[in-house]
Amino acid sequence: MGCVKGIGMAVASWLFRLGLAAWVVVACVAGGGAAAAAEQRLVLYSANDNTVNSTVAEAFTKASGITVDVVSTGSGVLFRRIASEQERPQADVIWGVSSSLLKENSRFFEPYAAKERNAVAPEYRDKNNLWIGTNLQILTISQNTAAIPAAEGPKRWSDLLDPKWKEKIAYTDPANSGSAYVTATFLASLWGGGDPAWTKLGTLLANTKVLNRSTLVFEGNGSGEYPLGISLEYAGLLWRQNNAPVQVVYPADGTVAIAEGVAIIKGGPNPGAAKAFVDFINTKPIQEQLLRTTFRRPARQDIDLASLPGHMPPLSQLKIVPYDDAKWEASRRETLARLKTLIQDTR
């Protein structure tokens, strides 16, 4: 009992409820107040926005008593930081980064089999338990129905090639956006690859206004400045929730589900708290809370989406096309150079 008091009764009680009694024992065996105090803190590296970070950090602290220190910036910056700290890691967990980056940087991670991992489809988690998906980003077309009546908008990616949409489509520069890069390379694959596919991609880009940040696409489409936006599911749903006349179009010719996930950093200062956080972030109530507040589609497949805000269609109702992220990550530099040329040539 004395050791449990050292950990903190609130923390110990929460760990037992989650089924993490072993971590109470570990904290006791690890020895004394210093180790116990360390386990009451978590350093979280996150590429999520502040709303998402605060929603989860506050809920985790309330449930566990563990204080969360969030470092929030771009995923590339976070991984460079992890690499530079490899000899003496400063963070415990990285969260909110794409599965392609998690795969690429898996050498920095400590394997951990999350308690409810089987609720996440195998394609959205690592087979060696180095990372697990927490949410899915779906590539979509956002349509402002005040500018284009609902029934008159594009239904397929190929519809965006029509000259009537010239300068009416907002798109983020793929050099500045991971999802915009995925969209371009996905379409190159969808349209058959090779020069004919890149010609089609050039036709699409000629119709777009290329913006520096994804938020400019979301805002411009929501306000009606750009009737169409090459976007993400959550952004359209969020603007619609805020009473903007935005319709989310799931293209009939297919789309991609991009997993974003969480991983424990190898050698981090608070391994017990890290494992507790990974289990917490993957629980059904937290996944549902994130959907309600931020419209992040859960990676869990046991959540009734139709009963929650946004009324997202289940993946089974969408045409999800496989995406070779390893191939496109390996060729990122030359692909971005080709895209830059296409964008310049079509201005």
Image (tube, rainbow, N blue to C red):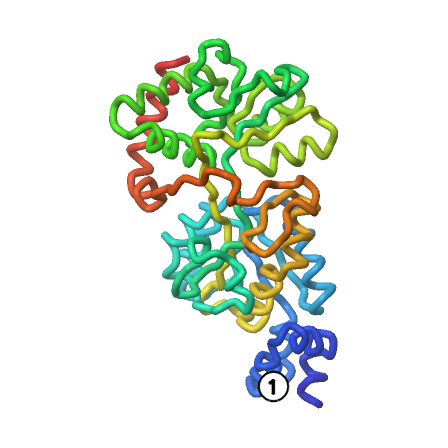
Q: Residue furthest left?
A: 194
Q: Which quadrant of the rendered structure holds the C terminus?
A: top left
Disc 1, SS? helix
Q: How many marks?
A: 1
Q: Residues within 10 Å of mark 1 (few under 14, many from 20)?
A: many
Q: Residue at x 53, y 40 (%)?
A: 317
Coordinates of residue 131 in the picture (x, y in percent): 46, 60
Q: Would you identify the image quadrant in which residue 253 lies?
A: top left
Residue 226, above or below 84: above
Residue 284, above or below 312: below
Residue 250, above or below 100: above
Q: Residue at x 41, y 34 (%)?
A: 181
Amino acid type of the residue tagged 1 in the rendering: Cys
> Nearest the camera: 297 or 219?
297
Coordinates of residue 212 in the picture (x, y in percent): 51, 27
Q: Which quadrant of the rendered structure holds the N terminus?
A: bottom right
Q: Residue furthest top?
A: 164
> Nearest the camera: 310 or 70?
310
Residue wearing tag 1? 28
Q: Residue at x 64, y 35 (%)?
A: 237
> Nearest the camera: 36 or 186?
186
